[in-house]
Amino acid sequence: AKAAGGGTVRFYTRDLSVFAAERVKLESALWSGLERSEFSLFYQPQVRVRDNAIVGAEALIRWQHPEFGMVYPARFIGLAEETGLIRPIGEWALVTANAQNRVWRSQGFPELRMAINVSTRQFRDGGILHSLQALLAAGELDPGSLELEVTESSMMDDMEESIGILNDLRALGASISLDDFGTGYSSLAYLRRLPVDRLKIDQSFVHDMESDPQKKTMIKEIIHLALAFNLGIIAEGVETSGELGFLAEHGCHEYQGYFYSRPVSASEFERLLRAPRTN
Ligand code: C2E
Ligand code: CA
Ligand code: CA
Ligand code: CA
């Protein structure tokens, strides 16, 4: 496999879905990757539309494999979820992102909301709740600055249970964002009952919206829904000024996407905090 570029890795993981032996190989590579600290977090700014201020960061995991090079989460999160490896990986991501946010605070940067992605498994089995409780007990967590991104589809299997878990998480002080919003099947009635703080418009609606009236309609509807329910609203995958303009016009609070910045390393993120873009 070559060291850089997604091509080789993509080929490799496509094989994995076919051959069980290859899956076992990736699984053990994931384990040793954890042991050898091959994972890192990149951070993407979450930006307020009104004044372009960076108000948050989404932590996104990266795997720097000695042989395959940079492996993106799409290639391994699914398998990690199936095998249960997502537990230690997710725990590591929470601890690391939280520690990073505390470092930034101590360096005098304004308070940031740190968003981490929570897999269905971590959500359902109480893993994320226990990790939060442990950090809190150790005095190492400012829960008010932590946001948990849960997907709409994670909520679906068991609505009543989901509501209970969300309430427990919020009781600890964390906020909840409903990720990939619009791609699931949630009805209005159901959304009304979900204790969440923010909707995150899925990037599939944002992508190419300017040439697609249906996407624009969907985006408008989701923004209006969020505003009507008194929820925060953020759009992801914003790549152009035209997309941002449309979102601003319709009252979207925040955005994230390549237009402002790709996900970057912690040190590059610091540079963005020091010298924010003005667009
Ligand atoms: P997601 O949570 O929906 O994250 C958004 C993805 O869109 C990220 O891909 C991000 O790099 C990418 N992105 C951001 N801005 C743009 C843009 O303007 N244009 C385009 N085309 N893409 C953009 P990434 O980092 O490869 O992550 C993919 C998925 O992997 C995430 O989707 C999330 O579901 C999962 N993931 C990442 N880190 C973690 C983690 O620590 N734990 C768990 N459970 N899942 C994670
Ligand atoms: Ca996310
Ligand atoms: Ca998303
Ligand atoms: Ca997604």
Image: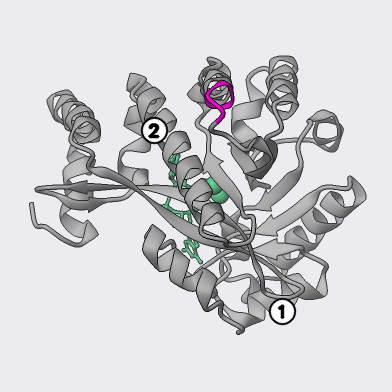
Mark nearest the camera among 2 and 1 is 2
Q: Residue at x 69, y 57 (%)?
A: 234
Where does residue 49 sit, x and y in percent of width and height? 72, 71
Q: How many marks?
A: 2
Residue 138 forms part of the magenta stretch: yes
Magenta stretch prevailing secondary structure = helix
User: Foreground residue, 186 or 89?
Assistant: 89
Give the magenta range. 135-139
Which label is found at residue 207? Answer: none
Q: Residue at x 73, y 17 (%)?
A: 164
Q: Residue furthest right?
A: 228
Q: CA distance from mark 2 to mark 1?
A: 37 Å
Q: Residue at x 73, y 29 (%)?
A: 170
Report the residue marked by disc 1: 245
Where does residue 41 sit, x and y in percent of width and height? 38, 49
Whether ligand 1 has any atom under 8 Å from the Cβ at mark 1 is answered as no
Image quadrant assignment for residue 162: top right
Where does residue 227 sit, x and y in percent of width and height? 87, 54
Where does residue 209 sit, x and y in percent of width and height? 64, 70
- Tell me the crowding category of disc 2: few under 14, some 14 to 19, or many 20 or more residues within 10 angstroms, Cα based: some
User: Foreground residue, 213 or 112?
Assistant: 112
Which label is found at residue 92? Answer: 2
Q: Amino acid at mark 2?
A: Trp
